[in-house]
Image (cartoon, helix red, strand yellow):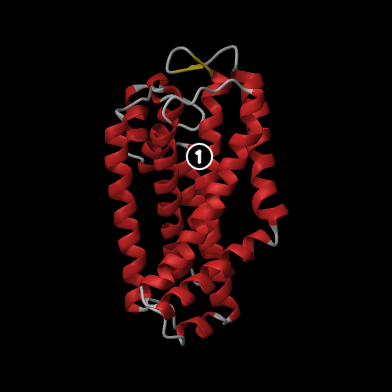
Amino acid sequence: MPPSEGVAFWTLFSKEVLRFWRVALQTIAAPIVNALLYLLIFSYVLERHETGYGEVPYTAFLVPGLAMMSLLQNAFANSSSSLIQSRMTGNLVFLLVTPISHATFFLGYTLAAVVRGMAVGGAVLAITMPFVEVPWVAPCWSLGFALLAAWMMGALGVVAGIWSEKFDHLAAFQNFLVTPLTMLAGVFYSTASLPPVWEGITHANPFFYMIDGFRYGFFGKADVSPWVSLAVTVSTTGAVSFWAYHWIAVGYKLRS
């Protein structure tokens, strides 16, 4: 990367990180509170009735799922909300007239989303794990899946931010695609407890493999092989990243 591109990347990346950090009460603290509420409600209701993977206490099973759910939703929200706001206010043009490369544009938004997703997910783990006994048998697996998932959702946020022409479009993208795929990806349950039809539907959801692989790092157990989860996650991340980069490269909707 030429020095000028390095400066451009750091400027854009820093701007995007500062954008969410300056309102950390909304972007960091609020998702943590939401995750804690899920933990309190679901653990109280289901702790005595459900387990994960047959023997893992339900509350312990729930913690990694909530952390990953928070990571996914907040990584997506960071890049998508930034782009739609810039487009609606008209200040995106000041970025487009600069001589930065398409890769710098993509990396600046995506990596800032990774930072926010990892910050929220890590904070959820840090706050909940002292109160719940959760083993961590393979931390490298968890870290790898967390980074891949945050990257994928950051790139998906770029796609959503470019596609959306107003805030209603972005809300529809999140409410009818991102939220259902996240909530129905095994955050609150093991797919082994589902009827065969619903188990098959869940296995068709790429978000499931991110959560299942991430949870494998904690318990050394998963609903599917971690290598299968890794293959699906890597291929999904690559496809979404190519999609986002292509739209940036061709200028799709960016100047309209």
Residue at x 57% of width, y 81% of height: 91
Whether 74 is drawn above or below 138: the answer is below
Q: Looking at the picture, how far across and down is residue 241, in whole percent? A: 34, 60
Q: Residue at x 41, y 64 (%)?
A: 159
Residue farthest to the front, as pictured: 3
Crowding at mark 1 (Cα within 10 Å: few <14, some 14-19, many 20+): many
In which quarter of the view is residue 37 placed?
top right
Q: Residue at x 56, y 75 (%)?
A: 86
The image quadrant where one finds the N terminus is bottom left
Q: Split into 4 quadrants, where in the image is the C terminus?
A: bottom left
Q: Position of residue 220 (x, y in %)?
A: 39, 23
Q: Looking at this rendering, what residue extends furthest in the bottom direction?
A: 97
The residue where tag 1 is placed is: 68
Closer to the camera in the image, 127 or 69: 127
Q: Is residue 245 above or below residue 256?
A: above
Callout 1: helix, strand or loop?
helix
Residue at the far right: name it: 25
Q: Position of residue 196 (x, y in %)?
A: 32, 23
- Quadrant in which residue 130 is drawn: top right
Specify the amino acid type for callout 1: Met
Residue in the foreground of this view, choosing between 176 and 94: 94
Q: Is residue 111 above or below residue 188?
A: below
At horizontal 59% and vertical 18% (from top left) the residue drawn is: 46
Q: Nearer the viewer, residue 118 or 153?
A: 118
Total numbered circles: 1
Along the horizontal axis of the image, is 245 left or right of 48?
Answer: left
In this rendering, position of residue 116 left or right of residue 186: right
- Residue 184 image position (x, y, % from top left): 46, 36
